[in-house]
Amino acid sequence: MIVTYALRECRDLTLFSFYGKKSIFLDFRRISKYNHISMKKIETIWHHILWSALEKRQFKHTQKSLAEFFGYSLSTVNHALTVPSQTGAIRKETKFFVLADFKKLLYYWASIRNL
């Protein structure tokens, strides 16, 4: 009988099995409540911004905090915010950004989403 334990450290899920069998390393970015198999990294960031605005009433974020939370690079987070900031859905300030229009970001994401 193989005993398997799951340890959660630094948002990584690592599975260890005894008796010298395989150890499996699963990354948080691939298995999380935000990132499904069909979602891109940019869509994961948009989903988190929309979810936090709707559920937590948190409209103010920083690029660094999102990059650290998901384990993405700052350039990926910045790239995810370029088109929404051009359309006016997100307003960039000097040290943070604010979700200015919830519906604009939601409609933009729905228009490019390929189900």
Image (cartoon, grey):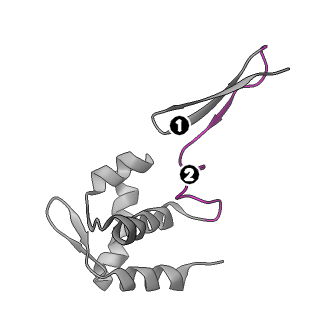
Foreground pick, 59 / 109: 59
**Going 62% across and 78% down the picture, which residue do you hit?**
114
Q: Position of residue 56 (x, y in %)?
A: 34, 64
Q: Residue furthest left?
A: 94
Q: Position of residue 60 (x, y in %)?
A: 24, 64
- Say whether residue 109 is left or right of residue 94: right
**Going 16% across and 67% down the picture, which residue do you hit?**
93
- Say whether residue 17 is left or right of residue 90: right
Q: Quadrant of residue 54?
A: bottom left
Q: Please name the residue that numbered disc 2 is placed on.
A: 32
Q: Secondary structure at mark 2?
A: loop
Q: Position of residue 8 (x, y in %)?
A: 53, 33
Q: Quick check: 86 above or below 14?
A: below
Q: Please name the residue that numbered disc 1 is placed on.
A: 12
* Mark with earlier residue (2, 1): 1
Q: Residue furthest top?
A: 19
Q: Position of residue 22 (x, y in %)?
A: 76, 25
| Principal secondary structure, stretch drawn in magenta | loop
Foreground pick, 52 / 105: 52
Q: Mark 2 and 1 residues: CB-CB less than 8 Å, in contact?
A: no
Query: Is 23 within the magenta?
Result: yes
Amino acid type, mark 2: Ser
Rendered-image quadrant of the C terminus: bottom right
Q: CA distance from mark 2 to mark 1?
A: 10 Å
Task: Rate crowding at label 1 as few (under 14), some (14 to 19) or many (20 or more) other CA atoms within 10 Å.
Answer: some
Task: Rate crowding at label 2 as few (under 14), some (14 to 19) or many (20 or more) other CA atoms within 10 Å.
Answer: some
Amino acid type, mark 1: Asp
- Do we see residue 22 in this rendering? yes
Q: Secondary structure at mark 1?
A: strand
Which portion, as a residue range, is magenta?
19-38
Query: Is 26 within the magenta?
Result: yes
- Do we see residue 72 in this rendering? no
